[in-house]
Image (spheres, helix red, strand yellow):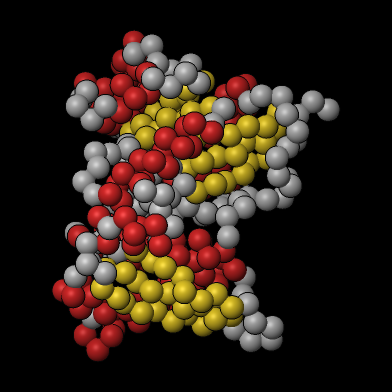
Amino acid sequence: MQTYAGTVAVIGKPNAGKSTLLNAILGENISIVTRKAQTTRRTVLGIYTSENSQAIFLDTPGFLKPKYKLHQAMLNYVEKAVGEADIVLIIADASKLLAEIDDFEDGFYQYLKSISKAKILALNKLDLLDDRKKMLPLMESAIKQNIFNEIIPISARKKVSIKELLEIIKKYLPESEFYYDPDFLSIQPERFFVAELIRENIFKEFKMEVPYSTEVVITQFKERKNEKWFISADIIVERNSQKQILVGKNGQMVKKIGEKSRAKIEEHLQTEVYLDLFVKVREKWRNNPNLLKSYGYSV
């Protein structure tokens, strides 16, 4: 049987639904999702395997104007994923597409024109349009850009046209043996997913600047026989005032984050864990190359 395999870079503006789509494709929540933009900071790798094809998806941070060195590091992940990919899958919020195409200042659609690889546009959030007929002028506008090889309307949240999207992707996969065991959904270490689950709960619990000023670093990860696994993590913030908010009165907020995170981590790891959280201040870490490197970012 002839098999096909390749890498698919998933790119788009913040909050377009990239992570929601990856989770819908895999049937598992391997990429954290919140209502806030810029939730994804690093590339998340997900593996989809069918009978004769395997697509390695690289879910990337949202394309944005850098305000911090952290943002530049996030854009580096986008460019690296595109460089490695056989296919570029662009996710666009259908309700914002026309305004985005007309806005040349941010350079996203100009950037797309510079990519000389198969490009598939998924017009996402179809479920939010009050009239499906509104999708026709959106598709016409996208076609006029002469950027995309294929265009398809989808709803990642409602899982509409996901199978059709996968069929389109398969058309562009090169002939190849599978890269990974068909049972694998990802090859990233458990430490990565644990840190992401903690960060997801911080994004869900706090508003405004706090989640964006926060990083999670796993300091200990001990798998123990016949007892709970031990995990210790530092929650990094930029100011003492942010630390006070995260810790909360009598430590109630950090306790709440810990309880919610532990439940998600146990569900993910399929074992009981003891989770220890510490909140630490590292001033202006988002603009500090040395700290960013120590947290695993490429700057």
Residue 78 higher or lower than 276, as above or below = above
Q: Is residue 190 left or right of residue 239?
A: right
Place of residue 296 in the rendered image (x, y in percent of width and height, measured from the top left) = 44, 57
Place of residue 99 in the rendered image (x, y in percent of width and height, measured from the top left) = 22, 26
Q: Is residue 81 left or right of residue 290?
A: right
> Hey, which residue is sitting farthest front in the picture?
290
Residue 128 higher or lower than 234, as above or below = above
Residue 134 higher or lower than 39, as above or below = above
> Hey, which residue is sitting farthest bottom in the picture?
250
The front one of 51 and 239 is 239
Q: Which residue lies at the image location 49% right of the left edge and 66% below the top edge?
A: 194
Residue 126 in view in this figure: no
The front one of 33 and 179 is 179
Q: Which residue lies at the image location 59% right of the left edge and 83% below the top edge?
A: 228
Place of residue 78 in the rendered image (x, y in percent of width and height, measured from the top left) = 41, 38
Residue 80 in view in this figure: yes
Q: Which residue lies at the image location 51% right of the left edge and 82% below the top edge?
A: 274
The front one of 99 and 106 is 106
Place of residue 131 in the rendered image (x, y in percent of width and height, measured from the top left) = 31, 27
Image quarter of residue 227: bottom right
